Amino acid sequence: MKTFLLSLLSLVATSWANLYVGETSLFRRNSTGLTDAVTWDPQSISIFGQRIFVLSAEIHPWRLPGNPNLWSDLFQKVKDDGFNTVSAYISWALHYPSPDTNAGQGDFQVGTYRDIQMFFDAAKEAGLWLIVRPGPYIRGGFPGWVENIGGSLRTDNTNYTAGAVAIPLPYLHILMVNRFAAWMPYLNTIAQLISKNQITEGGPRALVILVQAENEFSASAVNSPYMQAVIDTHRANGVVIPITHNDQHSGENGNFSPDLPGPERWLFSGDSYPQGANSWAQVQSVYYTFHEAVAFSNPLCLAEFGGGFLLNWGSELLGGTGYEKYCQQSSNESDLPMLTHSLATDLTDADYENVFYKDAYAQTAKIFNIYMLFGGTNWGQTAAPVSYTSYDYGGGINENRVAGPKMNEMRLQGLFLRVSRDLFGAIALGNGNNYTTSTIMHTYELRNLGTGAGFYFLRQNDSTSTALTTTQLIVNTSRGTVTVPQFGGEITFNGRESKILVTDYVFGANQTVILYSTAEIMTWSTIDTTDYIILYAPPTQMGETAFLFDFQPTIDLSNGPNVNMTFTNGTLTLQYLLDGSQFVIIEGDDLKLVVIIMDKTVANQWHAPVISGNRAFSNYFSIGSNETVLVGGPYVVRNASVTGDTLLLTGDLNGTTTIETIAPSAVLRLSWNGAFYQVQKTSRGTLVATVVVEHPDLTLPVLSSWKVSGSLPEIDPSFDDSNFTLADQTETNYTNLPPLAGSQVLYSQQYGFYGGNLIFRGRFNATGNETAVNLTVQYGFAGGYSAWLNSVFLGSSQGNATVSLSTDVWKFPDGALKTGMENVLVVFQDHMGLSETSTNGGKEPRGIRGYSLIGGNTSFSSWRLQGNQGGAAGAPDTFRGYLNEGGLYTERIGAHLPGYPDDTWATGSPLAGLSQAGINFYRTHFDLNVPDGYDVPVRLSFTPSSITSNYRAQIYLNGWQIGKYINNLGPQTVFVLPAGILFRNSSNTLCLSLWSLDAEGASIAGLEFISDGTFTTALKFEDYHGPDYEDQESLRPLGITQVPM
């Protein structure tokens, strides 16, 4: 072996640039100087001195609304599927509706989506490390009040960093000046929370290993001092773990790299979304080169790697969520029942993960975070204008919490990465098409120079190719250079397929060496004194694996009908056809080794849950426990433990399942979700039991018995708007987008309204010469508005995915103008969310940017506006939060809440709709009656009306606004009913607002419930009730029943 390692050193002369080979085994271990619990060198990070491959899943707390106990559902699925880390944004906007929220301590209400400590605790309980990404800026933007600050954001601008902030309090009709630094209270609070939960603290809450400062941010003379202030704030609040930063464009520019001049920081990373939007792309072979040029003292970290991609309004044809384009068509309907969709493609399916993720690992990525693994839902007003309700993202776990085929691929990768510790310290030796006998193949070679273990990453040169290709691979081993397979046949690549093939790979308690293998390794485990290793490849392919022994082993092929073997000069070579599962038992000289050979369809059904150890971090693999069992069959394995003679498993099944287990020899019984099952021992030493799943007789309800009320009384000139906010400001800090006309500034942010529908009422005394009004309304991408004069409809205007405002001249119809009297112009506006900094620097107003009367010299005498009841600072629903509602009349009075008295409302259905331009609001109830032990994810499906019908609908479930549907734009027609909001055992309240932008009115063509499937589960559901109407009645205006429009 020593001779072999010396020969390897001589080969590195042709390695990738900037690698100083003399130090490859002796890289200096870096730390923050404040702790050595998390350290790093150019190869990987280490936790408590152990190298770790960080395989991370991006999940955002608020995007699973309602019951926060369901975070555990996601975390258990993530852990089961091979991940060891979760990465999470924290949203400043959700915790700070005003800068002085809770005296500057923010809103982290226990038992809500804002309970970040509960989020942390759930991740810790699942055995996952945590990367916290609190900004202050994140995708989705800032709190609305931040936009009111004078000057630019995310810089050392003193107004942003330490200046005065004007705080509108619309419910008190005053403007307060607050001298908090804009971002400092938030970051102080969140940094203190991180500090208490960082890995250095020990105890039940220690899990945070990295914290990210800012987000996708570029260094500059004005940016860098601000970045340093952010870092200093973390340090001042006790954060001692490494601070990271993610640079856009795969890290090419090295913004805030520790190896370049600039602020203090410790770990550098890049973001990459390599897949095409409409067709397969070539892999990006740039990560290693960029990294070595700008951050060579760090391990290669990809802080955001595309699990899918973001879709905008109107970006796809109407149907589903739009994200079906990223989903793999499933041959097994129970894998992903709802999302086998006619629009599905393979853009980011399991084959994408197989090719693109492995290519990143091949370029030495050792910190790898998938954005998004679970995207979730942009409920209420939490979406930015660049996205719509569904934030599914094409993730491995869909918006309705269903783990799809992509998670099987991730489990294969994650379990391999978990046990292949020699890879963590491996360096890149070279790459190209000279490693194989086929020149259309591309290979990367990584090698651990300390142990000699080699890792060859193979794919087709053209990663878009779907051609069937065969080849041999030329590898360097401790027995010399070998072309494999050696004994006939070739390695097969069926189109978009990649393989990680090993040489001199040591595994197990007996330190067995695999000289080479043309099949991939899924995982290995030592159970009792027996070593088990699982090899896999797609069905019908051939594999060849060579083991080294210094004795003549005995081989049992009785359970390997398609396996042949040869033993020569201490090398045992197995040749096999991949078909089902086969067990080869190898014994001798105190060794017992079981080689399990599976075709990939079988391997996709196997799991390796961790058995908790007796040390600290007991359920963290390698740090607290190295013990696992092997389990085949279930859809999800949530937890595993051994008590006496019983293996206790909890998890989910998608049908009747034969569960096969490999467990300690003392195990004689199986418990699944608390029920005991008779087991049989197979000839290959496994235990099997069949769990019969009987689906409940569950029929999804039909929607009927709707009540309806009009919801636009504000268009009546006599409407009393004295409680609306007087728009009396004449100056603005939106100097980049100043008002275009009119004396009053009508920007909603300046009056404390940051999301949801907006209503403006302008008054003027007419001379009779006025013929029209010119309006410019800024609503955000895909927004729209309607206008009325004295209850007479003037017209509507809309944007699209690239248009965020409209300028229109509306002529006054005959008889609409009241000469010599006060006239009332009403503008009802959609609000598509606050802009990200990629649009106008994050300072883009919502509201009326310009207004003027045409004809005569008349001006508006006054304007009043209304958004959500109480504005952001005084919203009555502190449970769901200020972004749950907008300014719709029925929202303000609480008609969307359970228990609202609708006895006097008319009977009417949204399928009948409106007969004119305007808004109706509909209420109904339904029961599900899902028995305990079952998970039935449900969605509401719209049948689109004619594409020429311009209407918008908002969906409310049990008081939560859970969706926005735009008929003429789409793409989303199917909306998740979040399990944390949906009641299983009590009556649900479903409401819809229907806004017709057309004079002819509008109706919804159809509404029905559909399901993603039925699963038996260990998950415990509860009807998680929030405040109802009675709880908030005193905080809301008295509702008056309106005649439907």
Image (spheres, rainbow, N blue to C red):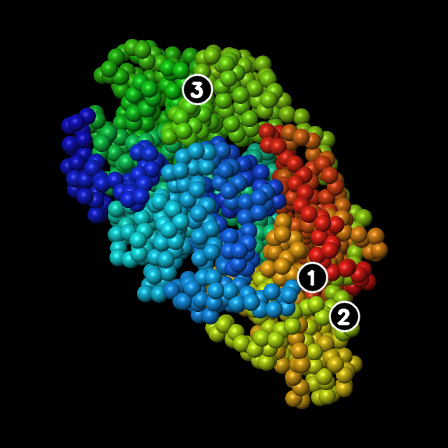
Q: Left or right: where does residue 77 sit relative to residue 572?
A: right
Q: Quadrant of residue 455?
A: top left
Q: Position of residue 654 (x, y in %)?
A: 59, 30
The quarter in which the N terminus is drawn is top left
Name the residue at 53% across, 40% down.
118
Question: Is 288 above or below relative to 888?
Answer: above
Q: Which dot marks residue 888?
A: 1
Q: What separation in Å lies between label 3 and label 1 (alpha carbons)?
A: 63 Å
Location of mark 3 (residue): 582
Assign a secondary structure to mark 2: loop
Identified at 61% across, 28% down, the residue is 655
The kind of residue on which mark 2 rests is Phe
**Viewport quadrant of the C terminus:** bottom right
x%, y% of residue 149?
48, 67
Instruction: Single out the mark in the foreground, 1 or 2.
Output: 2
With respect to residue 180, does 976 lie above or below?
Answer: above
Instruction: Check disc 2: other Cα within 10 Å, few if <14, some if 14-19, many if 20+.
Output: few
* Distance from the alpha carbon under mark 1 to that under mark 2: 14 Å
Is disc 1 in contact with disc 2, using a CB cutoff of under 8 Å?
A: no
User: Which residue is more in the foreground, 181 or 208?
Assistant: 181
In this view, the residue farthest toward the front is 103
Q: In the image, 525: left or right of 480?
A: right
Where does the image place residue 985, in percent across and percent down from the top left?
Answer: 72, 36
Can see residue 236?
A: yes
Q: Is residue 659 above or below residue 474?
A: above
Left or right: residue 322 versus residue 707 is left
| Residue highlighted by disc 2 | 719
Looking at the image, residue 632 lies above or below residue 417 = above
How packed is label 1: few (under 14 Cα within 10 Å), some, or many (20 or more)?
many
Is there any visible trace of residue 796 in the rendered image? no
Q: Determine the CA span between mark 2 and mark 3.
A: 78 Å
Q: Tell me which label, 1 or 2, sits earlier in the chain.
A: 2
